Amino acid sequence: MSMPVRSTDATGRGRSGFTLIELFVVVTIVSLLAMLILPAVQSARESARRMSCINNLKQVGIALHGYVGTYNVFPAASNGLGFSIHVQLLPWLEQGNLYDSIPMMVGATEFGPQVTNPPNQLAVFLCPSDPDAAGSSRMTNYAGCQGDGFRGPTPNGVFPEPHTVTRTEHTRPGNITDGLSHTVAFSEWLLGRRYAADGPTAPVRLRTMYTSNLAGPAVADAMFIEKCSSLDGMQPLSDVKGATFFEGGGVSTNYNHSLPPNRPSCLNTISSPNAGGPAAGSQHSGGVNVLLSDGHVRFQGDATAIMVWRALATRNGGEIPSD
């Protein structure tokens, strides 16, 4: 009976190595492992970015209550010279030197564009989950809540916007009769971009401000939300959400709950039941982080019922919203 002959190389030693089939199997296994591991790595990185975003909101909450503890009122949406909530909170965010360097008598509209030298951007005002936050200047991912967005003599949120630049509106803790833990003070939004000439891609739709002059039945609340969501009859604005954290007021540093989170931001130029406004939004999957008036942060899902979302925005609506 003949024995199998072992293959040898030129030196007489047995030949070892991979066959093509073995090599193909190894490459396939490595590829499969990479396909399994990469999503986990990306998920871990996003979890870290999201946690950083939450911590930023918590820092804003601590600063907010530092301000309330000193003055017994919440900051104004825009002080008498047009400066934002963010500027008013700087001393409680370990930015006293920056606050002292701001020439308050100049006014925010004139001063904001002049700020070009460091420190002109604060990490505490940016969410690292938003890719546009990297390298941005003077912008903010966090906006103060003005209320539910409906027209009235005064917005009904924690930070009602004044009707004139020289008039300020302050909310006292006792004015929040719906309860501090049931009233949103801040939320996230995606940094704005100007409308591209070739039309907006889906991600840009959540960053661009739109406007319309809808009249008649089209201004009904549900219809307005539908048209804003589809951008039917809407035109892009040049205003950029969160363009500067120095200036107070809508678009720059304030938003409302007229529209659900992670929808386009729309305004209506004709008086209607719903004026619309800048919407909350984020790159987090499924919703946005919100800072409640008592200082705690929670995640609010996109599927939150619109009436609950609006109830969370009002300080004195008589509702106790549920999740």
Image (cartoon, rainbow, N blue to C red):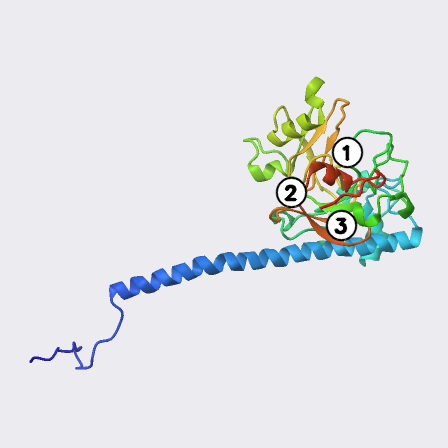
Which amino acid does the dot numbered 2 rest on?
A: Asp
Label 3 or label 1, whichever comes before in sequence order: 1
Looking at this view, name the residue that lies furthest to the bottom: 12
**Residue 61 placement, left or right of 25:** right
Asked which secondary structure carries label 1, the reply is loop
> Quick one: 35 or 200, which is closer to the camera?
35
7 vs 159: above or below: below
Residue drawn at 81 percent across, 56 percent down: 62
> Quick one: 276 or 182, which is closer to the camera?
182
Q: Which residue is mark 1?
A: 149
Q: Which residue is mark 2?
A: 302
Residue 95 appears in view: no
Disc 3 vs disc 1: Cβ atoms closer than 8 Å?
Answer: no
Mark 2: give few (<14), some (14-19) or many (20+) Cα within 10 Å.
some
Residue drawn at 64 percent across, 29 percent down: 226
Q: Which residue is mark 3?
A: 291
